Amino acid sequence: MNINIREEQEKDWYETEAITKRAFWNLHVPGCLEHYLVHLLRSSKDYIPDLSRVAEVDGKVAGTVMYSKSYVDNGKQKTEVLTFGPLCVDKEFQNKGIGSLLLKTTFEIARKQGHKAIIIFGEPGYYPRHGFKTCDNFHITTKDGKNFDAFMGLELVPDGLKGVEGKFYQSEVFENIDAVKAEEYDKKFPYMEKLKLPGQWDT
Ligand SMILES: CC(C)(COP(=O)(O)OP(=O)(O)OC[C@H]1O[C@@H](n2cnc3c(N)ncnc32)[C@H](O)[C@@H]1OP(=O)(O)O)[C@@H](O)C(=O)NCCC(=O)NCCS
């Protein structure tokens, strides 16, 4: 298997969204919005294309990680941090190390670009193996003052979050995604049935 990690090009847009749909469909809720989010992110002011990457396997897009700017606000000052998401790997290529490679590669690029930390909402079972700790370790809460297992941070450099305390705000592009527009956008992709499955978030 020949894996190539590279920047996304416009010719990849449809395929990146299609794999995102397949990876997230019926995972957390019946259906998913993540492929529409990928589309929205690309035109967001907070999107960071020079850090986002796709994984190509034998010439075919098989995974993606998209980065955006977010910040921690202590009431007096805002400190910029990174967020990534969606991170996904196409169904048929999962558990072959591609997600890990996308993360490892982009963490290295982020360090070279001078970024100090990443904060995410993500799978609590997956990210600790990549060095993430829950944000209560850093005295950082959600914008609603909460901490929970899925809310995690990673210091890209030693003490990358030292002195950074307060509330975390991710890009507005993640908030209040319009479900009607998402439904309409989904029609570009092959039909998949929405199912309510055990293990999904309560809706
Ligand atoms: C999560 C995801 C990006 C991981 O990428 P991947 O290439 O499949 O994963 P890797 O091959 O790098 O790592 C595989 C390991 O991670 C574990 N893993 C994968 N997804 C996991 C999850 N959601 N929770 C806990 N562990 C997980 C596997 O069990 C495997 O463990 P092992 O090495 O002990 O056998 C991919 O499975 C995916 O796209 N999932 C659906 C979308 C998703 O959940 N994205 C993350 C949202 S925060």
Image: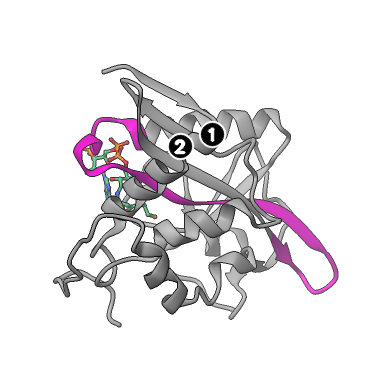
Q: Secondary structure at mark 2?
A: helix
- As measured in the structure, the alpha-carbon distance from the residue carrying label 1 to the one carrying label 2 is 5 Å
**Number of other residues with Cα within 10 Å of mark 2, as a class: few under 14, some 14 to 19, many 20 or more:** some
Q: Which residue is mark 1?
A: 9
Q: Which residues are magenta?
A: 71-99
The quarter of the displayed image where residue 158 is located: top right
- Residue type at mark 1 is Gln
Which label belongs to residue 178? none
Please identify the residue farthest to the top as the structure is shown.
Answer: 2
Q: Position of residue 44 (x, y in %)?
A: 65, 57
Q: Position of residue 97 (x, y in %)?
A: 30, 30
Q: Position of residue 144 (x, y in %)?
A: 58, 80
Q: Nearer the viewer, residue 34 or 129?
A: 34
Residue at (55% x, 73% y) in the render = 175
Residue at (22% x, 44% y) in the render = 91
Report if residue 128 is visible in the image.
no
Q: Nearer the viewer, residue 174 or 126?
A: 174
Specify whether residue 73 is painted magenta: yes
Q: Which residue is mark 2?
A: 12
Residue at (47% x, 43% y) in the render = 13
Ligand 1 quadrant in view: top left
- Residue type at mark 2 is Asp
Specify whether residue 5 is painted magenta: no
Question: How did the renderer colour the structure?
Answer: one colour
Contact check, label 1 and label 2, Cβ < 8 Å = yes
The quarter of the displayed image where residue 109 is located: top right
